[in-house]
């Protein structure tokens, strides 16, 4: 593969912290068995792919193109709930989307004066950026006032968006951030009888089972300092004084036990206590052996009479509050930093209220995947460390594509649970120089990501029009679309076209790219084979096929109703001509007799012929740079 420049980068959420906490929360039993099936007569319902469209809600509808670093709302603009018009939602649906993940909805810290609405000002000393991190939630029972046309009416405006999304045939996902909350958490909107996090804590001790936080007794919190960083880039603000009142100091969100965290710690947040003692031992009932094979109903029944820590109940109630408002699912931030027993308790309660709830979890430790799926009752986990990272290495010329086969085969028992993506709010944009270098180079990555397993596909807004994340927002710098600043998203804004949502300002190449995504995603929604079996045909062709160049990767997907042969060219320079071989065992499994068979590409309609002789299949192919072929037999 042709190498491109690869820049080192630090993930916003350091994997080091995740691995540190996973050691604290280490589980000795890894569930291997699949959930047992009911003995009742089966009703055949053919499942289909889902596609999640992640939008950063604050940025989606922003029409302002100023993009001044550290700019205010007045200077740089901000999107609103009302920007998701019927037209916008219809265009999202036509792209091939089933779920919209509205990122950054819960009320988080933000540097803007909303005191006339009864909202306290947030201290820039413990807020990242000007618009604030969506993962420092200040009030779980309301929404970000920035997103409302009338902040006093913000919850009603979000409820209207839920209804509007449903009316347009889409479902709604929002974030829940279980591991940490804002340092200044205070809910103005909590239902009657709900107590705030920490309101009943015994602050004289480091740990107590029903404390919501961990404490550093006798020490006051100190704001972290750095020679290279000043809140709000050093501008004057009455609240910037290098101080934040918190006594005793609490553990920081990433697990730091220092009264003065490091500037690279998640100092804007505090860690929530789920009954894990400071020595890492568990202070709550554990699931009995065999619960990896039990249903969510059996998990729910198990927890019904158990005494669990206060934080468990608080987050369960938060999830059920939003479910009752029509939210169809949740994306859990840094879920592996919370014990899987809690997730069993939480998810079984959600599923009992809504059996179709759609649950995504951010988990980065492959050794824990099966625990969080089978014991934590998660629907889908990020396939970041395996498939995403490997695809990134391929397009940067670091690895050949052949290793994709081992990844898929090693996760065969859980492949349906491994959500695929190439862009999201944490990662470098695929079109950026730090990743693929152009959106066209990303096309084969997208085809593989979408078609290699049966799990849902996730697309981040702007990805489908080649957004490269090259805006310097201030706190957030280039290669990622900033989640901390008020910014516009240039390629997406050209598609938005002043609120017409018709792509009127897109270049021809951007229109072609969006058309590619539309074809691919809509095909994935209706393909029966993509919910069926996977087999690589890479090894045979790598070893025996003449002209099978380094950037080529091939595999088959099939069901009783549909058979697909998928070939991609990761090279962006070299056209490959070769005779693709279809192995004898595939031809036999598909029950194909000797003869000639027409095959048609499901993306652009190109045709070829499958020739079967003595039980062996071949297809003569020419595959252009960055081209992908999805042949249907």
Image (cartoon, rainbow, N blue to C red):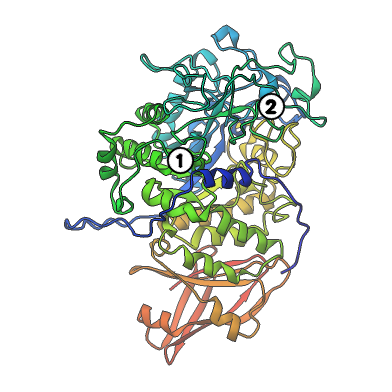
Q: Single out the residue that lies furthest toward the bottom.
A: 614
Q: Single out the residue that lies furthest toward the right.
A: 227
The numbered mark at residue 352 is none
Rendered position, 151 above or below 624: above
In front: 506, or 136?
Answer: 136
Horizontal side of residue 244 vs 369, given as left or right: right
Q: Single out the residue that lies furthest toward the top.
A: 116
| Mark 1 secondary-structure assignment | loop
In front: 517, or 108?
Answer: 108
Which residue is found at the position 75% from the left and 29% from the top? 66
- The residue tagged 2 is 260
In front: 27, or 406?
Answer: 27
Q: Position of residue 523 (x, y in %)?
A: 46, 58
The numbered mark at residue 281 is 1
Q: CA distance from mark 1 to mark 2?
A: 25 Å
Which residue is found at the position 58% from the left and 19% from the top? 184
Which quadrant is home to the C terminus? Answer: bottom left
Which quadrant is home to the N terminus? Answer: bottom right
């Amino acid at each position: 593969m042709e190498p491109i420049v690869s820049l080192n980068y630090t993930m916003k959420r350091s994997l080091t912290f995740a691995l540190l906490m996973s050691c604290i929360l280490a589980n000795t039993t890894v569930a291997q068995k699949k959930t047992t099936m009911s003995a009742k007569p089966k009703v055949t319902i053919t499942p289909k792919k889902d596609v999640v469209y992640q939008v950063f809600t604050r940025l989606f509808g922003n029409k302002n193109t100023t993009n001044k670093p550290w700019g205010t709302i007045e200077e740089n603009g901000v999107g609103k709930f009302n920007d998701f018009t019927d037209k916008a939602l219809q265009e999202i649906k036509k792209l091939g989307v089933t779920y919209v993940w509205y990122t950054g909805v819960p009320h988080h810290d933000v540097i803007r004066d909303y005191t006339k609405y009864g909202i306290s000002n947030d201290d820039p000393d413990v807020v990242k950026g000007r618009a604030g991190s969506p993962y420092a939630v200040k009030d779980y029972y309301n929404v970000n006032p920035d997103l409302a046309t009338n902040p006093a009416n913000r919850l009603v405006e979000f409820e209207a968006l839920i209804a509007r999304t449903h009316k347009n045939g889409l479902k709604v996902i929002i974030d829940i951030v279980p591991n940490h909350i804002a340092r200044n958490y205070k809910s103005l909107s909590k239902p009657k009888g709900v107590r705030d996090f920490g309101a009943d804590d015994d602050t004289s001790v480091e740990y107590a089972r029903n404390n919501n936080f961990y404490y550093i007794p006798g020490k006051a919190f100190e704001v972290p300092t750095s020679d290279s960083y000043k809140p709000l880039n050093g501008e004057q603000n009455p609240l910037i004084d290098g101080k934040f009142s918190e006594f005793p100091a609490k553990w920081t969100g990433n697990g730091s036990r220092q009264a003065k965290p490091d500037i690279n710690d998640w100092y804007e947040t505090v860690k929530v206590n789920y009954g894990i003692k400071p020595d890492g031992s568990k202070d709550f009932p554990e699931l009995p052996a065999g619960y990896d094979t039990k249903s969510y109903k059996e998990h729910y029944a198990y927890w019904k009479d158990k005494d669990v820590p206060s934080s468990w109940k608080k987050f369960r109630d938060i999830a059920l509050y939003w479910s009752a408002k029509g939210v169809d699912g949740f994306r859990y931030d840094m879920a592996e930093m919370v014990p899987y027993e809690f997730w069993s308790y939480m998810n079984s309660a959600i599923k009992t209220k809504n059996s179709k709830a759609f649950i995504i979890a951010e988990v980065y430790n492959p050794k824990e995947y099966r625990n969080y799926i089978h014991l934590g009752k998660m629907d889908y986990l990020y396939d970041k460390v395996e498939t995403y990272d490997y695809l990134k290495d391929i397009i940067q010329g670091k690895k050949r594509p052949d290793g994709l086969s081992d990844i898929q085969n090693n996760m065969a028992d859980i492949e349906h649970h491994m959500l695929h993506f190439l862009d999201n709010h944490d990662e470098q944009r695929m079109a950026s120089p730090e990743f693929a270098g152009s959106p066209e180079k990303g096309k084969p990555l997208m085809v593989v990501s979408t078609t290699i397993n049966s799990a849902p596909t996730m697309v981040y807004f702007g990805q489908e029009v080649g957004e490269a994340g090259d805006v310097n927002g201030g706190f957030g710098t280039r290669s990622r679309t900033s989640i901390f600043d008020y910014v516009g998203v240039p390629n997406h804004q050209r598609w938005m076209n002043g609120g017409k949502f018709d792509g009127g300002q897109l270049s021809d190449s951007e229109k072609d790219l969006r058309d590619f995504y539309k074809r691919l995603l809509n095909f994935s929604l209706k393909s029966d084979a993509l919910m069926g079996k996977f087999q690589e045909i890479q090894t045979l062709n790598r070893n025996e096929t003449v002209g099978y160049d380094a950037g080529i990767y091939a595999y088959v997907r099939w069901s009783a109703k549909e058979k697909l042969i998928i070939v991609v060219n990761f090279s962006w320079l070299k056209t490959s001509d070769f005779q693709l071989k279809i192995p004898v065992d595939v031809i036999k499994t598909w029950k194909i007799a000797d003869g000639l068979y027409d095959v048609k590409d499901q993306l652009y309609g190109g045709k070829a012929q499958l020739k079967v002789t003595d039980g062996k299949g071949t297809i003569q192919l020419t595959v252009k740079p960055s081209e992908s072929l999805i042949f249907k037999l």
